Image (tube, rainbow, N blue to C red):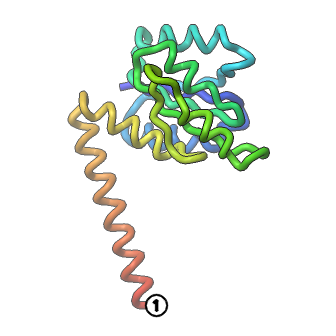
Amino acid sequence: MKIAIVMGSKSDYSVVQKAEEILLGFGVETETRVISAHRTPKVAAEFAEKAEGSGIEAIIAAAGKAAHLAGVIAAGTALPVIGVPMKSSTLDGLDSLLSVVQMPKGVPVATVAIDGAENAALLAVQILSVKYPELRAAVKEYKEKMEKEIIAIDEDFQMNK
């Protein structure tokens, strides 16, 4: 089980790192790269083309501003690609969100919220869980744990308000 995470800039790593942590928590191997759709287009194309052959089963692509990285990667592979639009200084990430979500017919990119790296990782794990039953069980446990935590918070809140 291996999921690649690509980011358009090293400055995206503080957000992307959260996806790595989620994936590692599920026992999924990660490969994290800095690849720019605009400044290293040949590298992006080669990465996309060779991803499946290197054992990668899904790709998370995080980028801001024009945010074409997820689309460029999706154009070059049959693997599922999940786009993470990054918050940018210009339009608070709305520009990134629109760039990632508005893909042309035939080049799908699943898109999560602005800076939504954790959900991108969880979605990638759920996609892989179709093939790996142990991941499906782990996702169910994760959701049960989350539910119990919220119930405990609510009970504490009700007692202390």
Q: Mark 1 points at which residue?
A: 160
Residue 36 at x, y percent in the picture: 68, 22
Depth check, front residue: 86 or 132: 86
Residue drawn at 74 percent across, 47 percent down: 91
Up-down: is 88 above or below 130? below
Q: Which quadrant: the N terminus? A: top left
Residue drawn at 67 percent across, 28 percent down: 8
Position of residue 138 in the picture relative to residue 86 (left or right): left
Depth check, front residue: 16 or 79: 79
Using the rendered view, name the quadrant where residue 10 is placed.
top right
Residue drawn at 45 percent across, 34 percent down: 110
Position of residue 118 in the picture relative to residue 141 (left or right): right
Residue 126 at x, y percent in the picture: 33, 39
Residue 32 at x, y percent in the picture: 56, 27
Using the rendered view, name the quadrant where residue 88 is placed.
top right
Up-down: is 105 above or below 88? above
Depth check, front residue: 106 or 31: 106
Position of residue 132 in the picture relative to residue 8 (left or right): left
Element under disc 1: helix
Report crowding for label 1: few under 14, some 14 to 19, many 20 or more residues within 10 A (C-alpha): few
Q: Which residue lies furthest to the right in this view?
A: 90
Q: Which amino acid does label 1 sit on?
A: Asn
